[in-house]
Amino acid sequence: MLRNCDVCVKIWLNLYNISMEKLDKATPSNAAAFHAQISGRVQGVGFRYSAQREAERLRLNGFVRNTDRGNVEVWAEGPPDKLEVFLKWLRRGPEYSRVDSVVKEDREPRGYRGFGVEL
């Protein structure tokens, strides 16, 4: 069942001929993105949840998750200046972690909404 605000959004989108799919994939024109692999003592030390908090503080979108090889993988998108701040944080990591390396690749934004921890 749709809530009243959901109905209003659907009516507004219909009036302006915007599909929900286009809205979900919309990214700001100045958005950038990167994919990073972080290695070191990064699992079992709260790295993912600390990274999520930092990304949310910076209002970035994407995800963070552990890999089978003991690393942490990050996809982040947003304004380039905020991505740079986040990358500096990833190189430092939270307390009790030890970051040995960060391998970063610039990518095209995919239009993620919010920043989540993937299991």
Image: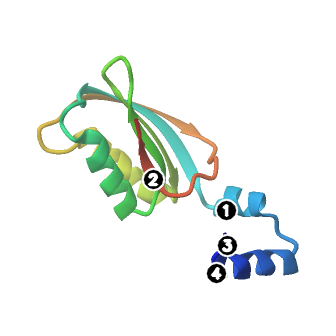
Q: Residue at x 35, y 17 (%)?
A: 69
Which residue occupies the foreground of this view, 84 or 45? 45
Report the residue marked by disc 4: 5
Q: Is residue 14 visible?
A: yes
Look at label 1 and name its amino acid.
Ser
The crowd level at tag 3 (other Cα within 10 Å; few <14, some 14-19, many 20+) is: few
Relative to residue 83, is residue 57 depicted above or below? below
The residue at which mark 3 appears reads as 2
The reply, left or right, for residue 63 in relation to residue 113 is left
Residue 1 appears in which quarter of the rendering? bottom right
* Mark positioned earlier in the residue sequence (2 or 4): 4
Q: Which numbered mark, 3 or 4, is in the foreground of this view?
A: 3
Residue at mark 1 to residue at mark 4: CA–CA distance: 27 Å
Q: Are marks 3 and 1 in contact (CB under 8 Å)?
A: no
Task: Label 3, secondary structure: give it.
Answer: loop
Q: Disc 1 versus disc 2: distance between alpha carbons?
A: 19 Å
Q: Which residue is mark 2?
A: 115
Whole-Å distance between the Cαs marked 2 and 3?
A: 25 Å
Q: Amino acid at mark 2?
A: Phe
What is the three-letter code of the residue carrying label 4?
Cys
Q: What's the residue at 46%, 44% (across, down)?
A: 63
Give x and y (percent) for residue 14. 85, 75
Relative to 33, is 16 on the left or the right?
right
Q: Secondary structure at mark 2?
A: strand
* Spot occupied by residue 57 in the image (x, y as percentages of width and height): 35, 63
The answer to whether residue 100 is left or right of residue 31 is left
Residue 42 lies, with reference to residue 90, above or below; the image says above
Give the Cα distance between marks 3 and 1: 31 Å
Residue reaching furthest to the front = 1
From the image, tell me which residue sits under label 1.
29
The mark nearer the N terminus, 2 or 3, is 3
